[in-house]
Image (cartoon, coloured by chain):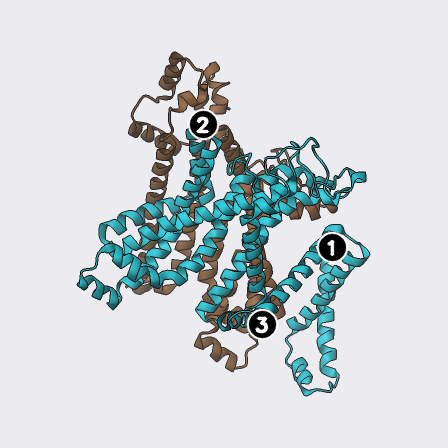
Amino acid sequence: MDAFLWYLSWAVAIGIFGWVFRFVGQKVQWPSDKLNVYFRDMPLMVGIGFVFGLVILYVVFHYYFIDKSTFFRWAVQGFVIFAITSWLFLALGKHVGTQATRKVFRQMPLTAAFGILIIIIYAIMSIFAGVIAPYGQEEIFEKINVLPGGDPALGGDPRFPLGTDQLGRDLLSRLIYGGQNTVGIAFVTTILAFLIGTTFGFLAATLSGWFDQAVSRVVDALMAIPQLIFALLLLTIATAWAGSNKELITVYMIVIIAVLDSTRVFRLARAVGFNIVVMDYIEAAKLRGENLSYLIFREILPNAYAPLLAEFGLRFCFVFLTIAALSFLGIGIQPPLADWGTMVRDLAQFINFAQFSPHTAALPLMAAGAIALLTVAVNFVVDWMLHKSSGLKD
Amino acid sequence: MSLAVISGLKAVALIILNRLALGVVTLFAVSVLIFAAVNILPGDFAQAILGQGATEEAVEAIREDLGLNKNAIVRYADWLGGILKGDFGVSFAQANFSSFAGEDASKGGIGSVAAQLEPRFKNTLFLAGVAAIIAVPLSLVLGIMAALYRNSVFDRFVNISTLTSISSPEFFLAYVLILFLSVLNPLLPSLSNIYVEMTFADRLHKTLLPALTLTLVVMAHMMRMTRAAIINLLASPYIEMARLKGIKPARVIVFHALPNALAPIINVIALNLAYLVTGVVVVEVVFVYPGIGQLFVDSVKIRDIPVVQACCLVFAAAYILLNLTADIFSILSNPRLRHPK
């Protein structure tokens, strides 16, 4: 109850100071007329907002410089570093490249630049994981449970900057290979989902009639079950099928998630397709006697690229998160393949050491944060693309 | 009551009945789907219980016992009939010990799926309820404020932070909360061991951290949708009129825009509560919360198929029910949908 009263008094104080801030601002004769008008028309909430912002700045300052909370400092430093690099990236893009790319960069908000930068970094990291990673993902060393930090006095080892796991595998290498596996598998799954979804969606749009009805009803039934739940049910069955063959489980997982996810792609492709099918040029193509594949690949597909591309980003995020969640639950990507979801689960108990060894506690957060960072980046880019294509101004 | 009102009510009742019937049909289709998915298993339940080293006679005996040698349609009818009476069958994990040692577990004893499901279902409802109670008002207020001060620093900040929390996996948010609220500042417990004899305050205290995680996940969606719904309305002419009359912006939003935005907002709330259903699985595993999601994941791991089947059905039913509620409320609050042409 004390804590509650404490926060309540803070809220009241912020409210009062907000009012005072606005009141003083209105009474003072400012040198520029703009400021005078600004204070005169200021709603009370904006005044409170200013004071609230000040309080937040103070809290950040307090934890950063006075309390010196390690994790908070890392978070703030990470934020600042990312902000500066993406600003530099944006500035670079504005001056380097062709006319067209420079124009794109000029209109780009900072968040989208951040997203594109992160996606490029992840792509390079996963494609060249074999070159970048110091060791192999299944390579086992004699030293187990080496602590991260690389300081021998604290139980580290300079050869393994992030330490080793309970079997003696280098965690840095596993983190990098985990990116390759997790991102790669999610990418393959999304492409498969799009192949299935758009094929059926466009077929339903062009053929319509009973085919459309049949497929749509099946999709409705599939969509009525929450995706993660249904994926878990089907994976239970798939593991029984696969027996002890672990690679087969991963293949089954890709197929299952692709099929479940293709339902959403189907919905979009069908809706987009129906809008295109009624166009005159489709009518003309039909009268010319073109066949079905020509209609779909030459007439419908080129006109459906834009919405499908934005959807691809969103679906990739979704698939990526689903696979990570399944692996986290211990049913997704199977060992010895390294992957981020499984790493989070295996390293999770280290979080309890946060007060004694912040580096160790950061390990599970690093794997989980790697997942979060990519999805956040993709979402920022998709958000910007949707905003741009919809032409919304606010 | 005038005649027009009565006929209007009749139309509404008809639409709602229509939707309810559709929901029942969907649920039926889902149950068929789940049953079919489970029954394409190679071998069958009997082999799964006994493992590969079982003798043919033993397998045959269990098959007889569970009625597995009947054909699929009869078994489906039995299964569905049992569920309607509240009997979800016998759990494999319990079957090994109790029911084949002489106890009749299918009568609702310890081994029955229903007995396992019931307390956990209540726990999950409690968790989802706490999360909803925190998330709904908070996201409505923040959403309205973001719409009111759109394109300001506040709006940008809220936009970026919600986008980040939507995109993060649930377990990342959960571990960040554990790190800050449980390990570095021991305010809340990171393990939610709930049991029946707990007092309400104790229970709430232990549920708060998983509930906060779920809140973060759901709130972002709700807030963004609320903001979009209100901004959409603010472009309409009658709002412009109200503004030109000189009404304060806050009043315009609360008294003019909000009543008309209610339909999409209620829709948003119901849809996001449906989303909670899925989110609950991962969060319960992180916090070892004894809910239905944990039971589900554990059963998946030991391939306890009757339990998996039952959990899947419960989740799907909750999901369908909430989507149905969203549908019905949006019809009720929108006169245009109430009188279809």
Q: Residue at x 74, y 70 (%)?
A: A17
For residue B78, which quarter of the picture? top left
**What x and y, as percent, mark residue A1?**
73, 50
**What x and y, as percent, mark residue A179?**
56, 46
| Letter of the chain that mark 2 sits on in the rendering | A
Q: Nearer the viewer, residue B170 or B235?
A: B170
| Circle nearer the N terminus (2, 3) | 3
> How many callouts does the rendering have?
3
Look at label 3 and name its amino acid. His
Q: Is residue A19 rendered to the left or right of residue A234?
A: right
Q: Is residue B198 visible?
A: yes
The N terminus of chain B, quarter of image: bottom left
Chain B tint in image: brown
Indicate which label's residue lies in the foreground, 2 or 3.
3
**What x and y, as percent, mark residue B50?**
45, 18
Look at label 2 and name its amino acid. Gly
Q: Which residue is mark 3?
A: A95
Indicate which label's residue lies in the foreground, 3 or 1.
3
Q: Which residue is mark 1?
A: A73
Colour cyan maps to chain: A
For residue A306, which quarter of the picture? bottom left
Look at label 1 and name its amino acid. Arg
Q: Which mark is residue A243?
A: 2
Q: Nearer the viewer, residue A245 or B248?
A: A245
Can you say whether A65 is above or below A141 in the image?
below
